[in-house]
Image (cartoon, grey):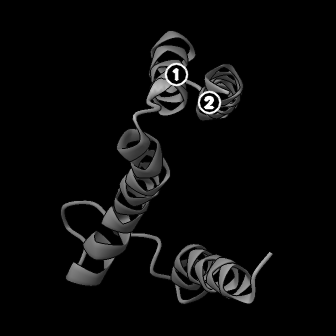
Amino acid sequence: MSWEVLALALIVGAANWGFRTLPIRFGLGSGAGPGGGMLARFLAAVGPAAIATLFVASSLPFVQAGAVLAPLAGTVAVGAVWVWRRSVVLATLAGALAYAAGFALAG
């Protein structure tokens, strides 16, 4: 593994930790509804924005290479299991398994 990849992983991990821990640490987790302040609304929007960013970042190399089976299988599995069971845990596990299976089949 190159030092650039390791540095990037550490930076992304630190940012992820900060986005999850600091709002709770400073009591910014409550009041994210319509009556909350601008900072509370911003922090409430960070989660979905981070998920969308990670989705695009993980799918883009496959789509550019023409290998859409892995991201497509993972996305369909997440959506299907979420609609079926309404469980984030099961949907995540199903998506990871389908992604891995699609990656293995694409070879």
In the rendered view, would you say 77 is above or below 54? above
Near mark 2 (Cα within 10 A), the count class, few <14, some 14-19 or many ≥20, is many
Name the one closer to the observer, 100 or 12: 100
Rendered location of residue 35, percent (x, y): 20, 67
Residue under the point 46% across and 20% down: 76
Asked if residue 27 lies left or right of residue 92, the reply is left
Asked if residue 15 lies left or right of residue 100, the reply is left
Residue under the point 56% across and 82% down: 15
Residue under the point 67% across and 77% down: 9
Residue 16 appears in which quarter of the rendering? Answer: bottom right
Q: Is mark 1 on a helix, strand or loop?
A: helix
Instruction: Identify residue type, mark 2.
Output: Tyr
Rendered location of residue 80, percent (x, y): 48, 14
Near mark 1 (Cα within 10 A), the count class, few <14, some 14-19 or many ≥20, is many
Residue under the point 67% across and 19% down: 105
In the rendered view, would you say 47 is above or below 16? above
In the rendered view, would you say 20 is above or below 90? below
* Quarter containing the N terminus: bottom right
The first of marks 1 and 2 along the sequence is: 1
What is the C-alpha distance between the residues marked 1 and 2? 6 Å
In the rendered view, would you say 37 is above or below 90? below
Residue identified by numbered label 1: 73
* Quarter containing the C terminus: top right
Pointer 1 and pointer 2: residues touching (CB < 8 Å)? yes
Name the one closer to the observer, 107 or 97: 107
Rendered location of residue 58, percent (x, y): 50, 51
Q: Is mark 2 on a helix, strand or loop?
A: helix
Rendered location of residue 60, percent (x, y): 39, 50
Residue identified by numbered label 2: 99
